[in-house]
Image (cartoon, rainbow, N blue to C red):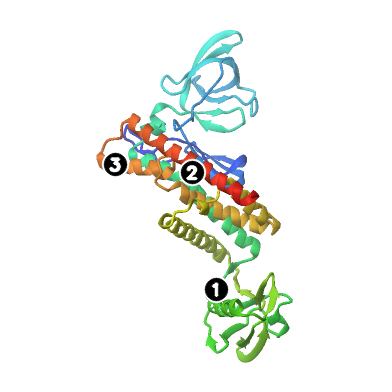
Amino acid sequence: MVISTSPRKLVSLVREFAIGMGPKIFAHTGKDGTLYTIRILPLGGYVRMAGWGEDKTEIKTGSPASLSLNEAGVVTRINLSGKQLDSLSLPMNVTSFDFEEKLEITGLVLEESKTYKVDHDATIVEEDGTEVRIAPLDVQYQNATVWGRLMTNFAGPMNNFILGILVFILLFFMQGGVANPSSNAVSITEGGALQAAGVVTGDKILSVNGNTTDSYTEVATIISKAATDATTAPSFDLVVEHDGKNRHVSVTAEQVDGAYRIGISPILKTGFVDKIVGGFQEAGATALRVVTALKNLIANFDVKQLGGPVAIYKVSSQAAEFGLVSVLGLMAALSINLGIFNLIPIPALDGGKIVMNILEAIRRKPLKPETESYITLAGVAVMVVLMIVVTWNDIIRVFF
């Protein structure tokens, strides 16, 4: 992370920048000391800040550790995991330590009590094998500038957005491309009505029932409206372009999964860049839908419109029935949803913390710790009550 040369740091030490949740499947420590991880569940993410919340280094008295020392006899690595050992490490049973001010560790080495200085940028391997930097006071969250803390509070939601974008990109690679609804060229469904009429993938639909169509969106809109209004299978007169030549095609829709269809889908853009750009565009479109839904919810608030863990489980189960692509699509959408939700200005959420950071910048002084604690507790209380009500509604809706 970027650090200024002034006594007060621009940002605090980021111990871990994680994409996803659960056990880690990839880990890399950057030159800045930050551990970058990808975790097995592609939903959400988090930023572990030094000195933030419950992020405290805890070593139980008597815990075995292996110390790595530099040529000056200063500790550069403390290993608590019992793994990743080297032949030159020094075994110690830790009796006390101070990684914030004095930067030292004391313990028994061959039954003799010894104290060693600890390097400012030393790392500690935790019991689960995660290796992170220690956090002296000067790099802790509370000692960062207000703008540094604001950036930190935004980093959590940003992780959600990054994960959503990456999953959407993965989906487009799995599907072979990105739908191109702005083109009137279509992809033909195997066994569909249009395939039986001799139309092939790549043909362009120039008009439907006399209505000129310049894009797949226009084609789909006309067909969907006619199918919705119809009591029997609707018929369509199309002008189709094939190899530069136009011909008239008459087709009758077929009922598929309870709806009338003629067997078309958007043509795919298959370029590498198209898939990358498509991931960003789909994430943006998803975010816009979430924001619109939130605006509508605020304008016409009804707690019954909200869904909690039970609703998510039900939707996830339904998605699983349609395969991996549907599950990944849901996870990407949930991740974007979670990122936006965390930016809502409720004190218990990142959005609430960002608002307090902005107020501090405007006032040029922080809120009193007691005041900030009361505001945060009020936000937590609101979230807990809302969670209980939403979960109860989920149970009633799903099981009764």
Callout 3–callout 1 Cβ contact below 8 Å: no
**Coordinates of residue 150 in the picture (x, y in percent):** 38, 42
Instruction: Please provide percent x and percent y for residue 36.
Output: 54, 41
Q: Quadrant of residue 93?
A: top right
Tell me the kind of residue under disc 1: Pro
Q: CA distance from mark 2 to mark 3?
A: 30 Å
> Could you tell me which residue is drawn at 44 percent across and 42 percent down?
349
Decide if residue 182 is on the left or right side of residue 102: right
Tell me the quarter of the picture where residue 230 sits: bottom right
- Tell which of 187 and 120 is nearer to you: 187
Marks 1 and 2, the one that precedes in the sequence: 1
Q: Amino acid at mark 3?
A: Ala
**Residue most extreme to the top:** 112
Q: Which residue is mark 1?
A: 181
Secondary structure at badge 2 equals helix
Mark positioned earlier in the residue sequence (2 or 3): 3
Left or right: residue 352 compared with residue 66: left
- Residue under circle 2? 386
Instruction: Judge whether 316 appears above or below 204 on screen.
Output: above
Q: Nearer the viewer, mark 2 or mark 3?
A: 2
Please report the residue visible at 46 percent of the width from the left and 23 percent of the height from the top.
Answer: 99
Q: Which residue is mark 3?
A: 361
